[in-house]
């Protein structure tokens, strides 16, 4: 600029990569009085980039503040390496840029087997004296044992394995908290696309309605609290959300407030930053336009994904389907011997949690344009389970293999979903593929019926498995091939018509889920709870459309969850009547049992 001295090439590089200079309001983390900073931001906001830059350009420059040690935790090892370490928003690329531009120290040592890296000491001295960063995964609670750190980055907290426990009964979150103790003021940074998981709602409550220690002590002195969780009378009213810039939708809760009851100063344990996808100018214009279009519908489900508002989107007591009621079932993978037979993961999982009947349900789309619905495609089974001390008939969603419109190229959607549905039936040993024929009529059945009439031979099954297990020999695949070829024979195709509207279905599903009759299978070889994030999110985020909403907003695309709901109706023997209700058999209460023949 005229009148200002020119920048040297080194200075230009430093400014070009200076996160402290370029970060948007809300993206630059400044440690405050709170213990946990929770970034609940829309998809594409730049959460991972934010923290990786913070670690490389801020934490690594002052390792003594954190006792010299930090840890990164994510849902599973693959996600941690992809998103937090080696991906475009990860620590390794950020450290390389920081070192080249002079904004931070570089990484001078690493051990990928033992899961640690070490930054160069900021004031010289080589590898000694720099910040050491470990990484771990919530899928293995033991991986955080023995840690002793001053700074934590926990990525995708909402879909972490909070229901996987170690021998002491702790999940990774509870096992890690006592280890955050180095330095004078250790901190935790959480990044997540928010969900309705109870663990996320607990964080939101601590940020928006923190506890007053004085009121809590006085209340508990009068006797134990027996009310609902997160509704304790010593919590403050909901915090206002302060905009961090008038041109942005990024907001923060207030970490320091005054208790209206006793007047004492209250420091919240958690501060939450809510960031909108549309606030990121670095995103492709199409991605920002898509997010804006979703937000125009005004639903909390859209805001949850693109412009979260915390407890306002958390699905309170009035929600038709609550996240915590959809139970998570786990199964341990069989131990594979090197050079031994390839394990049959699907049958082993079914045997471990006691599955009875298995079906595949398809809610087919009949078009494949940009505005088309997805084809909901799920495998599910029935089992007997104990819930709150009583035996229930429980439906377990096994896998979500739904088909997006963009997966259909140059042909009818059935050319994609029919082979996928048939192969899922073969993998899970299902005897029935049930197809909804509300749209398209009986003709949508022909593609999958043709496949069932020509079951694959053992040679064809072997050819497919070779592609999925390229390192395995034919002898290792032999037992699995024979089982799949046997499962492929005798698969029947059935049609069903559904008449109830989505509000009635959602109410039925929510009520049965609250009774312990709905669950999903979360196994590591399918991605754990992340596998069901979209499907369960569609269920818990269902909102009956407003009468005054535009047509585009009134169209509620819930195809994945609707297929899971339909599979549950088939397995539990529930019918939808011509009156648009989910009907009970006489004298059987709200949810009635009818013969499966009534569904055909």
Image (cartoon, rainbow, N blue to C red):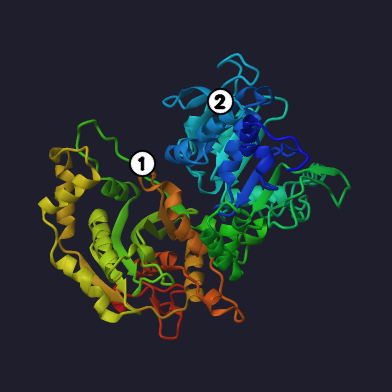
SS at badge 1: loop
Tell me the quarter of the image containing the C terminus. bottom left
Front one among 438 and 298? 298
Instruction: Decide if residue 260 is on the left or right side of residue 295.
Output: right
Front one among 81 and 282? 282
* Residue 116 drawn above or below residue 355: above
10 Å crowding of disc 2: few (<14), some (14-19), many (20+): many
The residue positioned 55% from the left and 66% from the top of the image is 294
Q: Which residue is mark 1?
A: 332
SS at badge 2: loop
* Residue 353 drawn above or below residue 445: above
Whole-percent x and y of residue 231?
70, 55
Q: Is residue 543 visible?
A: yes
* Residue 134 drawn above or below residue 574: above
Between label 2 and label 1, give the one nearer the viewer.
2
| Contact (Cβ within 8 Å) of mark 2 with mark 1 | no
Whole-percent x and y of residue 223?
76, 46
Rendering quarter of residue 148: top right
Rendering quarter of residue 7: top right
Q: Which residue is mark 2?
A: 106
10 Å crowding of disc 1: few (<14), some (14-19), many (20+): few
Instruction: Decide if residue 139 is on the left or right side of residue 347.
Output: right
From mark 2 to mark 1, how far is it between C-alphas? 40 Å
Q: Is residue 514 visible?
A: no
Tell me the quarter of the image containing the N terminus. top right
Whole-percent x and y of residue 170?
53, 36
Instruction: Decide if residue 60 is on the left or right side of residue 562.
Output: right
Q: How many marks?
A: 2
In primary-sequence order, the first of circles 2 and 1 is 2
């Amino acid at each position: 600029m005229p009148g200002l001295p020119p920048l040297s090439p080194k200075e230009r590089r430093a400014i070009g990569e200076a996160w402290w200079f370029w970060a948007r309001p809300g993206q630059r983390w400044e440690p405050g009085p709170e213990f946990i900073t929770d970034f609940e931001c829309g998809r594409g906001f730049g959460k991972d980039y934010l923290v990786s830059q913070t670690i490389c350009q801020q934490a690594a420059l002052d390792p003594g503040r954190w006792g010299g040690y930090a840890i990164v935790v994510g849902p599973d090892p693959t996600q941690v390496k992809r998103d937090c370490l080696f991906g475009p928003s990860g620590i390794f690329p950020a450290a390389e840029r920081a070192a080249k531009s002079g904004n931070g120290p570089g990484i001078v040592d690493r051990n990928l087997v033992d899961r640690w890296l070490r930054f160069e000491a900021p004031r010289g001295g080589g590898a000694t004296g720099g910040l050491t960063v470990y990484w771990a995964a919530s899928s293995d609670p033991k991986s955080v044992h023995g840690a002793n750190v001053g700074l934590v980055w926990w990525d995708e907290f909402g879909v972490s394995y909070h229901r996987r426990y170690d021998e002491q009964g702790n999940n990774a979150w509870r096992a890690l908290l006592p280890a955050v103790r180095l330095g004078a003021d250790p901190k935790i940074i959480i990044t997540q696309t928010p969900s309705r998981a109870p663990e996320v709602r607990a964080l939101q409550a601590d940020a928006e309605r923190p506890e007053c220690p004085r009121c809590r002590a006085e209340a508990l002195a009068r006797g134990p609290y027996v009310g609902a969780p997160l509704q304790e009378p010593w919590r403050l009213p909901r915090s206002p959300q302060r905009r961090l810039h008038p041109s942005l939708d990024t907001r923060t809760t207030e970490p320091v407030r005054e208790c209206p009851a006793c007047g004492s100063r209250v420091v919240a344990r958690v501060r939450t930053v809510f960031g909108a996808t549309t606030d990121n100018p670095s995103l492709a214009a199409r991605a920002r336009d898509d997010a804006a279009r979703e937000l125009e519908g005004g639903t909390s489900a859209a805001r949850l994904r693109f412009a979260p508002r915390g407890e306002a989107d958390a699905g309170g007591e009035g929600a038709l389907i609550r996240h915590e009621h959809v139970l998570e079932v786990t199964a341990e993978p069989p131990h594979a011997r090197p050079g031994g037979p390839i394990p049959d993961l699907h049958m082993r999982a079914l045997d471990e949690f006691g599955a009875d009947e298995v079906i595949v349900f398809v809610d087919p789309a009949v078009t494949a344009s940009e505005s088309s619905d997805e084809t909901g495609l799920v495998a599910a089974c029935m089992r007997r389970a104990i819930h709150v001390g009583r035996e229930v008939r429980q439906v377990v969603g096994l896998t979500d293999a739904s088909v997006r419109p963009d997966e259909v190229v140059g042909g009818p959607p059935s050319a994609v979903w029919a082979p996928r549905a048939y192969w899922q039936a073969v993998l899970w040993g299902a005897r029935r593929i049930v197809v909804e024929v509300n749209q398209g009529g009986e003709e949508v059945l022909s593609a999958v019926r043709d496949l069932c009439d020509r079951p694959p031979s053992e040679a064809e099954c072997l050819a497919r498995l070779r592609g999925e297990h390229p390192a395995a020999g034919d002898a290792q695949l032999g037992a699995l091939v024979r089982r799949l070829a046997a499962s492929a024979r005798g698969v029947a195709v059935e049609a069903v018509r559904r008449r109830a509207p989505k509000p009635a279905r959602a109410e039925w599903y929510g009520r049965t889920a609250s009774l312990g009759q709905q669950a999903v299978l979360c196994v590591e070889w399918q991605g754990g709870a992340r596998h069901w994030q979209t499907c369960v999110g569609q269920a818990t985020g269902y909102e009956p459309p407003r009468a005054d909403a535009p047509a585009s907003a009134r169209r509620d695309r819930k195809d994945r969850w609707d297929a899971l709901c339909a599979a549950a109706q088939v397995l539990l023997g529930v019918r939808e009547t011509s009156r648009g209700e989910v009907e009970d058999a006489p004298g059987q209460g709200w949810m009635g049992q009818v013969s499966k023949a009534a569904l055909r």
